[in-house]
Amino acid sequence: MSKKFFFISFLLFCLTTPLQAEVLTISQEPAEFKALRAAYEKQLENASTPEKLQQLQQELEAAKEKSLQSPALTQKISSLESARDIEVKKIQTLYNDRIEALKKEAMDATERKYQVVFDNFKNNTAKNVKNQYIVDLKQLEDKLIRQNNLAGALVVQNERNKSMGLSTTAVTSPVAAAVAAAPVVAPSAPAKPAPVEKKATQTASASSSKLSSANPQSYISKTQGLAGSGSNVVNNIYAFDVQLFGNESWLSFNGYGRTTNSSFGEVYLITPAGQRHQVASWSPDQLKATNYFGVKSANDVQPIKADITQFVNATGTYKVEFIYRDGNEPLTIYQVEIKTW
């Protein structure tokens, strides 16, 4: 009985021992617990609240303003602004140069146009006008003779002689003699035309009746010339001895720049009487290459044509002159042709 009591007492002692230990240590906090609780309390202090969010937003705005005032950023912005100013100046210069070039091109075009007017005006002297009048009278005289209108031809011949300072009082010319010998009324049997004073001119006019567009008379020069400025002028005047001409005459020429079509100029026709007329011009729009690999001959470029019928009205030497006006390159002339029928 005593052993049983002792065992029970020992068991109860063992069961109550832990409870007594916990009660004994409740006032002693473990270090880990202290650290955990301190972290928790700190987190509570930093916990988000509307007031703290507003304060943080204010700090952000202040930091942003401060960042814009940093020396590093200021230096970078200054460098970029300097680079920008340089580029803007280059662009302004480029466009200003282009605008000035366009203005110069417009003024040069106007100057070229008025240069032609000035040249024609300078050539339009009283002497030249009189010479052209004499040539026109001769052409009309020949036409009236071909029409057997000898009376009209005599009137024209008298006016031509008067303009040339010759006497018209005595009827001594072949036309006047033919008029005097012609019947008064004989429309069915007109008088035979008498020879005119310049036989070469009449021969050319009479022979021109054999010419046609299918059978024209051509005067061609394939001598290569150069029409430029300064010393860049070689063989820019072509002479043609026209002994046969028809009722229609055309000038054509094949030319191009040395490597591009950047060239401007005018073409003048000088008649046997010495009159000078602008009959054509050339510009980049007119100079058109037909060979992709470059222009080396007349076959590599399209010809430029001009109607010169009104100026080819007598036999003699006609000259074609090329005058350079503007552009990056002179005009290389490969072929010049006068065709009449």
Image (spheres, helix red, strand yellow):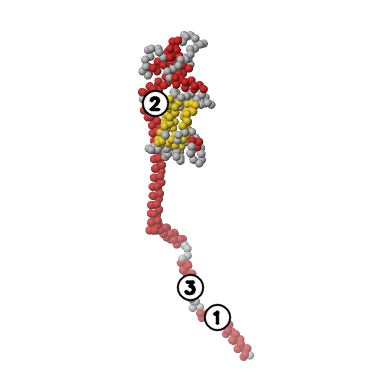
Give the residue displayed 41% in from the left and 21% down from the top. Answer: 135
Give the residue displayed 38% in from the left and 22% down from the top. Answer: 130
Question: Residue 92 appears at what percent x and percent y?
Answer: 39, 45
Asked whether 63 or 105 is in front, the reply is 105
SS at mark 2?
Answer: loop
Neighbourhood count class around disc 2 (C-alpha, 10 Å): few under 14, some 14–19, many 20 upward: some
Judge whether 275 appears above or below 73 on screen. Answer: above
SS at mark 1?
Answer: helix
Which of disc 3 and disc 1 is earlier in sequence? 1
Residue 35 is marked as: 3
Which of disc 1 and disc 2 is earlier in sequence? 1
Q: Is residue 314 visible?
A: yes
Mark 2 vs mark 3, foreground winner is: 2
What residue sits right under mark 2 in the picture?
A: 274
Residue 201 is marked as: none
> Does the CB distance between marks 2 and 3 fall below 8 Å?
no
SS at mark 3?
Answer: helix
Q: Amino acid at mark 2?
A: Gly
Mark 1 vs mark 3, foreground winner is: 3
> Does the CB distance between marks 2 and 1 fall below 8 Å?
no
Q: Alpha-carbon distance for marks 1 and 3?
A: 26 Å
